[in-house]
Image (cartoon, rainbow, N blue to C red):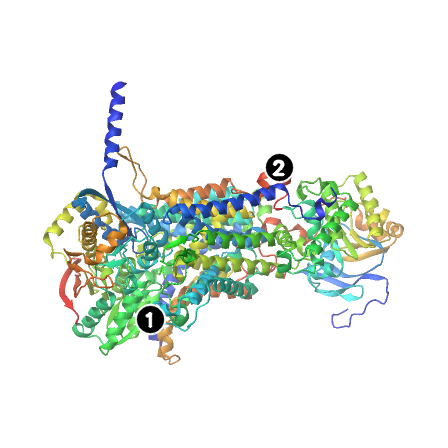
Amino acid sequence: MNNQLTKKKIDSATILSAVIVVCLYVAVFIAEQLIAPTSMLFTVLKKGATYALVAVSMNLCNGFTGIFSLGQAGFMLLGAYTYGILTLPVAERVNVYQYYGGGLVQFTLPWFVAMLLGGLVAALFAFLIGLPVLRLKSDYLAIATLGFAEIIRAIFQWDKLGPITNGSNMLRLFPNFNDFNIRGADGQVTVYLSTLVPLLIAGACIGIIVMLINSTFGRALKAIRDDEIAAEAMGIRLASHKRLAFCISSFFAGIGGAMLAMYQSTVQAKGFTTAMTYEILLIVVIGGIGSVTGSCISSFLFVAASEWWLRFLDQKQMIGGFEVPLLRNGFRLVVFSIIIMIVVLFFRQGIMGTRELPDLFRGRRKAKGGAKS
Amino acid sequence: MSAEIKRPANGNAECVLHIDHLTMRFGGVVAVDDLTMDINRGEIVALIGPNGAGKTTAFNAVTGVYTPTSGWVSLNGQDITGKRPDEITKLGIARTFQNIRLFSSMTVFDNVLTARHLRRTSNFLTATFRLNLAEEKKMRQETEQLLREVGLFELRNEKATSLPYGKQRLLEIARALSTQPKLLLLDEPAAGMNPQETEELGEFIKQIKEKFDLTVFLIEHHMNLVMGISDRIYVIDFGKQIAMGTPAEVQENPAVIAAYLGVDEDEAAEAPADARPEARDGNEEVSPE
Amino acid sequence: MKKVLAIVMAMMLILSAAAMAETVKIGVFEPASGDSGAGGKQETLGMQFANQETPTVEIGGVTYDVELVYADNGSDTTKAPSAANSLVDAGVSVVLGSYGSGVSIAGSEIFMNASIPAIGVTCTNPQVTAGNSHYFRICFLDPFQGTVLANYAFKELGATTAYTLGELGNDYDQGLCTYFKQAFEGLGGTVVAESFPTGTADFTSYLTNAANYGAQVFFCPVSIAYSTQIIQQASSQGVTFPILGGDTLDSNKVAEAAKGTNVQIIITTFYQEGAAPEFDEGIKAWLNADSEAMTNNGGNDMIAAVSAMGYDAYYVALEALKAAGSTDSAAVMAALPGVTYDGVSGHIEFDETGDAIRSSAFVKKINNETGEWEFVAEQTVD
Amino acid sequence: MWNTVFPYVLSGISVGGQYALIAIGYTMVYGILRLINFAHGDVFMVAGIVMVYMAASGMPLWLCIPLVLVATALVGFIIERVAYKPLRSAPRMSAMISAIGVSYTLQNLVLYITGGLNQLYPTIPWISDSVTIFGATTKMVTIVTPVLTVILVVALVMLINHTKIGMAMRAVSRDFETSQLMGIKINSVISATFVIGTFLAGVASLLYFTNYTTVIQTSGAMPGLKAFVAAVFGGIGSIPGAVVGAFIIGIAENIIKGLDIILFKAGIISGPMGLATFSDAFTFALLIVILAVKPTGLFGEKTTDKV
């Protein structure tokens, strides 16, 4: 009984959760070898993994630290561009940077290095923008970070930076998820990994975020969220801890941006709009502000529903000769909006509230204590 | 006394907290007016006064929530005027809040554990990648020990806000102790307690003072408690000191009696800091100019 | 009761019989919303009309029903990959589209990985097909179109200074502006190029810029949504220079916006109403009979060039299916380079990069009184 | 030089007046609820769409215009009751998320109804005519906007200072809880605020879409954000501040669009720099600078009555 607290306990619920996660990975690996790679399932998993990482990173800021940042799209853009610019094969640069004579950057980095750099660039910008912005309170901070994302978007579209960013034009032909597949000598794919690897990257990153949240720093961040004045009175330096959360969140948003680039196989500043940030925010809200598990589940649900399950709402459907009313282009999004408003107004806890996966297997009493995996 | 003058420690090696001509102004309102105090090692000193006398404001000025308009504060001879609250806490002043401010989403255990964060040696990388296991283990052991000592161990897995009121006050004190202070500031620790609980609290304060080698500085309205445990009492009204002395001396002081005449011991909000409504604290950082 | 049951049974039989008929799916990868939504819908109309005209195809001796499968790419390069993926998932044999080069490029990779050939209908940017073996195209390219327009501006309009305006991040706009600039400067003129951010509504300052630079032509090959605004604002500012545009401006919406104004609008395009009277007549009758199609066409029966192109694209796809003798997408891809077809927009034959060999473009302008397009010339470049 | 710059200033004044009318809605709501009503720009867009459909139904314009204004105010009223009122005691983040949700919903509804296509705004006679002033040709609406804005702002300030509901608004914006205790009917004050704010957004939409004649579901987003920045720039809660801020932003953004040619003519740069790319971003840069340097805006709360 004595040692129960002094050692962080790894209880059966945590082990069970870990087993479930591992099983899911194995299932994905097997499915990928058996099911045709063009199936919508894999699209959803790839995009879902990307969004899950970005949503969790946003949750670290908005949910665990209480910094209401709306700059996610901007940090993703930084990550995506850093990745795209640095991994583009030199031979292809003439084609891609067609209006800028092949561009200035004439080397190529391995994807992993470029992805990490993408995160670091995003974190660096977060540090710089955090200096003036993190002093602001909730809604001012929200609008300032949103503005920051718009500024970044404009800078990356600026013609004068074209030799680096390709101006407002698309970056493409850099390595994407399909390059994770292992091919035999004849060019045929022998082992499919194009879904598993993004899931592993996202899983590793989310794992690191969870470890941070469960460390002494994570507790300090939650303390700031719960009560800034009390946290400060307990010796927690607000500025440095907020900056830490903001930069780490941006770092992973940058990695998420690089993953989005790989998923889309093209990058263009035009796409990183406020609407993208809103979409991620809504994912976080649906999953539960303050729950990593919730953000992950809701990312996959959101992507699956919008890209796959609810697509039929956008097209005319005939049931036994009758045309179902209302169904036409855009209806899917209307249904979506209504679901979101219902969650926002009536189920403010979202899917998970502040609970995590292991809490689902624990008794009610312990679950109330929040994340402790 | 103006700020340009060199700030000496008051010469008394036993002096833990020295407040020197502290003035706190909000716009036209002078909340604390030229307050000078000394608190010596091992003392329990109380600050009393009618509602709105500026007691919590004085606390906030000492703990760095406010920067004094003029005057200065030193801790163990070190000038702490204008330092941030977290720096001051690190130097050894811990406090509780009049309107309880626990970390509402956390358990009792985590509330106390979090207050140990400031004594860490790890950085975020070593903490994230669990390279600080020894330190983390020590933090947990100490927290466990502390919880046992204050009698909250059985409730360690409860959510802080689900505790009864008296226990929440106790938890506030435990959390403050967890920062390993030399000086403990208690802002109305007995507010909302019944006489029996108040008496127990008095005993508890004396106990922890001994056990943790503390100096205690408290604001309190319950006169029984104040008179029972204090070594010395400062009385202020309208921000100004009107009396100082032992409990017996203060009780006899005509100025004190006059100030308290007709004032009931109602626990209403009194100082600007804590009276400000929670939900609308939008520009707190910029507003108190 | 028995009777009802019998009817239900009969209906189920019919339904299942219908389901059993062989079907070949053609993917329609077009924007139905967003800035290019109007154009995408018009391009789709051509395919729908063709599909309605020829709903079956004989492949390897079996008659297949042709089913059009739609995916809205929302004029947005970030939505394009998943829209493309939904077509792949639906098991299409060949893809038509998209209106807008950027979305075509963004969806390209998905089709390539699934070995599904795509036939670009009006995406004119060279990058769509360059380096890809799976992307084909039945229209002319931007270097050609840009040169035609530059020639026209310099030689016919006598302009020496041109102002080009494109949307930031729109590959079509940026590409065409660049090729126009190259050609125009090659002729000895000067060009000032500017871009506006997505979502801009206020073009007055850009028009002022053009005037301040002393431009004699205003070249804005932007999407329909922006061009109508530019025309209206140009009109209220009383600009004197003519507005030049590419094929995107060939829309009844643009004509409508210019009606009753003094703004001169000249464009290049793929098709001129009257070139194939039979097709004109047929599609007009169809539009007038189908209210939804009419709405998608912008409310009147003026034929957009993109509709004619969509119509031709559909038939090219059928030719490819026939030539492949199979609905297998890889077989269709292999057959496509050899396909030739004489469509309403002219003869279609692919070169080695998969682009149609086209040597002429139609130049049209708007009659400001009637609000209709008038044929000016057929231009070729050597 | 002036001849070069003047047309930009003219465009800026016009769009600035329209931003001003939107910004008032933001600043009033923020003054009372401390809520950034992210959906406000979308209400402005909905007003435009309603006008398009009303005019298309064959209704005469003299009837459409008042009906659009009433409908817009009604939309504002409904949004407050459905999406904000239930969250009044919830944390501020919840209300802000709800506002974002409303914005998303309105945009998607309009996307569905219009099929995602640009809708041509009906031509309102007289204000759509072209006029020439000081050698620059523009629409009549350019001149009408600032005049109408000033008239409406004066009327609004009078309403706030001299009517009962106006006094109630001022009281609520000063101290929400106390005014509730004093017997002010908070709900009707908040509803009135929303109705006035959205009504002005409706007026703004008439002017704005007459100038820039197409409406699409995203038409409200940018003007909305810019109007919000204008409100912050002027000092949130201050109506005159919002108006001044809006005009400054309107003019600045148009000058930036022409900055290349202006600098070129002034001999400062030798060729185009593509600075027009930053016409939107500039607004946000201004916002960040203002928030960092003087968070209370040009007319901070202390010097002005906030509502």
The answer, for residue C164, to whether it is visible in the render is: yes
Expressed as whole percent of the image width and height from the top left, the position of residue D192 reads 47, 46
Quadrant position of the N terminus of chain D in the picture: bottom left
Foreground pick, D226 / A318:
A318
Say whether disc 1 or disc 2 marks the residue closer to the N-terminus.
1
According to the picture, the residue beneath numbered tag 2 turns out to be A364
SS of the residue under disc 2:
helix
The answer, for residue D164, to whether it is visible in the render is: no
User: Residue, x 87% and y 49% (percent of image)?
Assistant: B251
Are dots 1 and 2 on a single chain?
yes
Could you say which disc has been placed on residue A279 in the image?
A: none
Whole-Å distance between the Cαs marked 1 and 2?
62 Å
Q: Chain of mark 1?
A: A
Most extreme residue toward the front is A185
Foreground pick, C103 / B44:
C103
Expressed as whole percent of the image width and height from the top left, the position of residue B165 reads 71, 41
Label 2 packing within 10 angstroms: few (<14), some (14-19), many (20+) = few
Amino acid type at circle 2 is: Arg
Labels 1 & 2 near each other (Cβ < 8 A): no
User: Residue, x 24% and y 68% (percent of image)?
Assistant: C143
Foreground pick, D239 / C176:
C176
Looking at the image, residue C225 sits to the left or right of residue A251; the answer is left
Looking at the image, residue A166 sits to the left or right of residue B144; the answer is left
According to the picture, the residue beneath numbered tag 1 turns out to be A99
Expressed as whole percent of the image width and height from the top left, the position of residue C7 reads 24, 24
Expressed as whole percent of the image width and height from the top left, the position of residue C76 reads 35, 56
Amino acid type at circle 1 is: Tyr
